Amino acid sequence: MRYAILSDIHGNLPAWNTVLSDLAVRKVDRILCLGDIVGYGPQPAECLKSVYSHAAAMLLGNHDAVVGGRMSAAVFNDRAQRVITWTQSRLGDKAQSLFAELPLVIKGPNFRCTHGDFVDPAMFRYVSTPEEAAESFAACPEQLLFCGHTHKAALYIIGHSGVVHEIPPQDFALEEGKRYLINVGSVGSPRDGDPRASYVIYDEERQAVFFIRVPFDFAAFRAAVAAAPGLRAEDVQLLRTAAVSEGASQVREEMDFEPNEAARVEGGAELEADLSRLKRTNRMLRTTVALLIAGGLAALVLGIVAVQTLLPHDVSLPAYSLPPITAVSILNSDGNALPALEPCYAKNDAVYCFPYRIFLDDRRVQSIGIDSEKRLVLRSSRPELETRFISPLITCFPGTRIEGMSRVRFSEDFEGSFQIYVIQVDKSKGEKPLFFRNFVDQNLSNEATPFALRGLRYQDGWKLARGTSDAVIDPDAAGVYVELSGAFRGEVTIGGLSLRRK
């Protein structure tokens, strides 16, 4: 099992999406979020939805606790209080209910996680010195302790001598007789002199921990702050140090939060949660429930898809894999390399779309149908379950870029996420996403639209998703396929899809 352990996203969607993309490449099995998903940043609802969709477990942070009504905002300074009040205005009741129920500690095999220190997780004390780390080591027995809160990646080690040593963050393999406290840093608001998003990977099989830093689009973050109504740029922590945008080495900030008895978390769910008993097993990096949308927020902002199926599906139609299709042999006059989408009923009213494949997580609450115009309809009554519609593997032309495009129509009661992915399959390196897109209202003339999508106007409710790969097809690529997938409640009608070289 490979765990991605991260913390302190703080409403920074560009940083979070960059980390998701990086996790897809690194093929992590589970994401553990150690809290402070919101606060400071301009996109709390979008981050919360996406983290909820992707994380196997989430902990409560001090900012989350205030939003959830479990702690007073008075323990923050005036600037932080203004941002928290603004954040609450952007989140609906469901988000506050979620924060009201999050645990303070997660226990895994030989490791333990919390947001602050381990002596009294409800107080959110900082671990920023060897002395504070020693207190946490004495408070619990696990060999590995993971925390966040300080926004500074750190590593503390204690051995047979009983003396805690702080060493620079670095990859390491676990050694018998030694214990480790790892501060995973901050995804969305780092303060340790490195402006890149920070997280760690714990590889249980290899018994090793890896510190990861990835750059994110700071300009996009700044633009999101400017576009957020009512949010003052001077209150956004990441913007208060001009050096961040210049990539300078000094990004240290004062702490906005003062741990004390008034800051103790009250109420909520059990303080500890055992990872082995969690019911929400996640399929790594596949967008799922969009449960926590703020009032009035219409756009669905989603993460990057992983390229491995980590949990089995309940049903696959057809039940066997299909051979690749050579793009050259089926190119239409408009360049679409995909075969026609022609769903049909077969034995026992099963729906097939040869050579496309359909995957459902639970056939009891998910189904496939055909509408009056012979279009494929995907149905689900459980927003946490995933539905996938996948094209055959298309062997393509090395050195070219690929455009993917599709139109779908959502039912009025649709709730959740649904998007298009284009994924390259390499002969030796496995799979990697070339890009993904969300479905949006967009007008596109018939002349600019592949034949498979013509006549589907956005005025009639058809939404469009299209994108072009930044990278060219690798020379050793076995092919490319298109996937339409998501987790939702309601119906999705697939009008058509296209894959063309650009």
Image (spheres, rainbow, N blue to C red):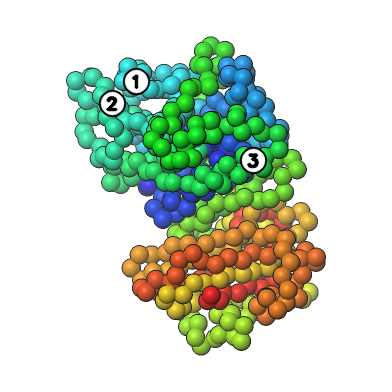
- Look at label 2 and name its amino acid: Glu
Looking at the image, tell me whether mark 2 or mark 1 is earlier in sequence order. 1
Q: Which residue is drawn at the image coordinates 43% and 41% (left, top)?
A: 247
- Look at label 3 and name its amino acid: Ala
| SS assignment at label 1 | loop
Q: Which mark is residue 89?
A: none
In this image, 29 relative to 230: left or right?
left
- Look at label 1 and name its amino acid: Thr
Q: Which residue is drawn at the image coordinates 47% and 37% (left, top)?
A: 244
| SS assignment at label 3 | helix
Front of the two marks 2 and 3: 3
Residue 219 in sight in this render: yes
Residues at marks 2 and 3, CA–CA distance in whole angstroms: 39 Å
Q: Nearer the viewer, residue 155 or 493?
A: 155
- Neighbor class of circle 2 (other Cα within 10 Å; few <14, some 14-19, many 20+) is some
Whole-percent x and y of residue 363?
Answer: 62, 60
Q: Which residue is drawn at the image coordinates 68% and 50% (left, top)?
A: 299
| SS assignment at label 2 | strand
Whole-percent x and y of residue 277?
Answer: 48, 38
Q: Is residue 270 above or below residue 442?
A: above
Looking at the image, tell me whether mark 2 or mark 3 is earlier in sequence order. 2
Residues at marks 2 and 1, CA–CA distance in whole angstroms: 8 Å
Whole-percent x and y of residue 217?
Answer: 51, 47
The reply to whether discs 3 and 1 touch (Cβ–Cβ < 8 Å) is no
The reply to whether discs 2 and 1 touch (Cβ–Cβ < 8 Å) is yes
Give the residue number, with chain letter if any, for mark 2: 166
Give the residue number, with chain letter if any, for mark 1: 129
Give the residue number, with chain letter if any, for mark 3: 226
Q: Is residue 498 above or below residue 366?
A: below
Q: Quadrant of residue 71?
A: top right
